[in-house]
Amino acid sequence: SRNIWQLPKESRQEIFKTWLKILRIDSLIDIDKFSEDYRKANDINSLYESKVDAAVLKSTKVIGMTTNGAANKNLLMRELQPEVIIIEEAAEILEASIIASLTNSTKHVILIGDHKQLRPQVQEFSIATQHGLEISLFERLINQGVPHVTLTMQRRMHPEISSLITPT
């Protein structure tokens, strides 16, 4: 074996570059392996959390969450198997958010809101208008003649109930 310091500078630089490439490749392989291990552990943890949450929530009659929450907790929603989903302020919610909240067990979707007030918010106006995203599923269904009920009188929360949530 020769002493590396006896090699010309250019040869030492080439050897150094080769060693760096080998180390980078080894590091990338390690990073890929650790990332995959982390993803698997995270998936197992998410499944476990969903099972624990479902065990607790199955004893309840009503569960409230946002459509984003329902979409993000899809494993939990599938475990709970809700047959009825009620969506408040449905005229303001993007169709995709509603669809992502549903599961195979859903039999009824009740949409509540005022389709003549606020519409869904989409960050990119041109995309919204090109793809019809500025109209909610709620408004689209009403416009297509799906039977619906429109309230003729606005009622406010009963004062006794309101006092429970109003700071004193």
Image: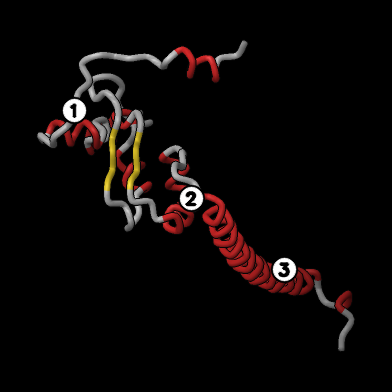
The secondary element bearing badge 2 is classed as: loop
Q: Is residue 122 left or right of residue 165?
A: left
Q: Position of residue 108 (x, y in %)?
A: 27, 46
Residue denoted by label 1: 149
- Disc nearer the start of the sequence (3/1): 3
| Residue pictured at 63% horizontal, 63% vertical | 38
The secondary element bearing badge 1 is classed as: loop
How many C-alpha atoms fall within 10 Å of the one at disc 2: few (<14), some, or many (≥20)? Answer: some
Question: CA–CA distance between discs 3 and 2?
Answer: 43 Å
Mark in front: 3 vs 1: 1
Residue denoted by label 2: 73
- Disc nearer the start of the sequence (2/1): 2
Residue denoted by label 3: 20
- At label 3, which amino acid type do we have? Leu
- At label 2, which amino acid type do we have? Lys
Q: Is residue 10 above or below residue 124?
A: below
Q: Splitting the image into 4 quarters, where does residue 135 fall?
A: top left
Q: Is residue 114 above or below residue 10?
A: above
How many C-alpha atoms fall within 10 Å of the one at disc 1: few (<14), some, or many (≥20)? Answer: few
The secondary element bearing badge 3 is classed as: helix
Q: On the rendered image, what quadrant is the N terminus found in?
A: bottom right
